[in-house]
Image: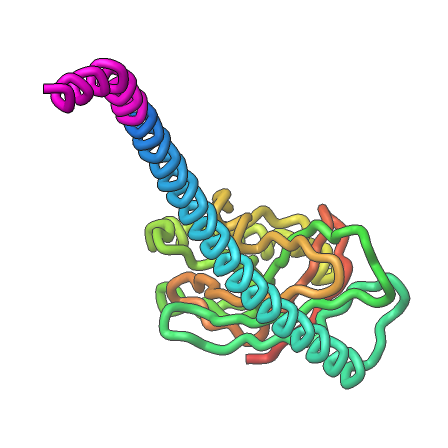
Amino acid sequence: MVALSGLSVAYLTQGPDTGAQQLRLRTESAALLQERFELEAERSQATSHFNQTQRALLTERAKRIELEKILATVQLELGRTQDQLAFFEDLLPPGPQGGLDIRAVDVVQHVEGLHYRVLLMRGGKETKPFLGALQFVAKGHCREAGITTEQTIILQPLLASPLPQNELAHGAQSEYDKTQSLDPQQTESQQVTTQSPRVRQTQAQQAALRLEFVQFQRGQGLLAVPPGFAPQSVTVRVLEGDIVHASKVVAL
């Protein structure tokens, strides 16, 4: 009976404190667990952000490497072009300082007309672009109604949608009539200058003959030939407005 009373007293004196301690421990444990979950969420978010940043850096690095390769290729091609230009400049005789010259020209018969290729170069170290145009003046014979006559006409570029054949022929005939009415004492240059173009020159044709370059320019294309006209030679001219800076005659 005495022992039982002692146990009862011990329970009464220690029981409530033990329960409070357990409750406190449970509360602290729950708080720590919540804090752990929050820390893991923050770490997961930080890890995701780090991975995204790393992928972006890898993508940018790959783009930079690709751009460096492209730049190296362009620089290599530029170096080759400069070497080729220097090579051709050494081969070709030098022109006057600041002068413009037709260094190479080729005009050949083609099924659809005349195919031309030209190479223009300027002497010296020019920095201001040259703005002008090409002009092709053909001399030959035109046969119409059984009559063969000599004609000097200005050829226009052959475009995807040329003018009708009857308009081309009419333009060629009107040019011949104007040529016959000129004073025979006039020079060929004056005769061609006083003539109007044999056909209307469209904006597309003007663009095909337009020149804009600093040191050199290459060009090629097709020239329309009127029906019945057989060209024997073509004079290639480089014009700046009405001023002829260079010309070269090509026999066909």
246 lies above or below 91: above
In front here: 61 or 228? 61
Q: Does the magenta stretch include residue 16?
A: yes
For residue 219, which quarter of the picture?
A: bottom right
- What percent of the width, then of the height, locates residue 163? 37, 50
Q: Residue furthest bottom?
A: 91
Residue drawn 60% across and 55% down? 179
Provide the residue span drawn in magenta: 1-27
* Residue 173 can be seen in this image: no
Residue drawn 69% across and 71% down? 248
Residue drawn 71% across and 46% down? 241
Q: Which residue lies furthest to the front in this view?
A: 2
For residue 217, which quarter of the picture?
A: bottom right
In front here: 238 or 164? 238
* Residue 22 can be seen in this image: yes
Q: Does the magenta stretch include residue 64?
A: no
199 lies above or below 116: above
- What percent of the width, then of the height, locates residue 40? 35, 38
Q: Quadrant of the C terminus?
A: bottom right
Q: Main SS type for the magenta part?
A: helix
Residue drawn 26% across and 22% down? 18
Q: Residue furthest left?
A: 1
- What percent of the width, then of the height, locates residue 186? 74, 58
Q: In which quarter of the image is the N terminus?
A: top left
58 lies above or below 81: above
In front here: 46 or 154? 46
Count of marks, rendered view:
0
Q: Residue furthest right?
A: 97
218 lies above or below 212: below
Judge from the rendering whether residue 99 lies leftward or rightward of residue 18; answer left or right. right
Judge from the rendering whether residue 42 lies leftward or rightward of residue 83; answer left or right. left
In front here: 125 or 137? 125
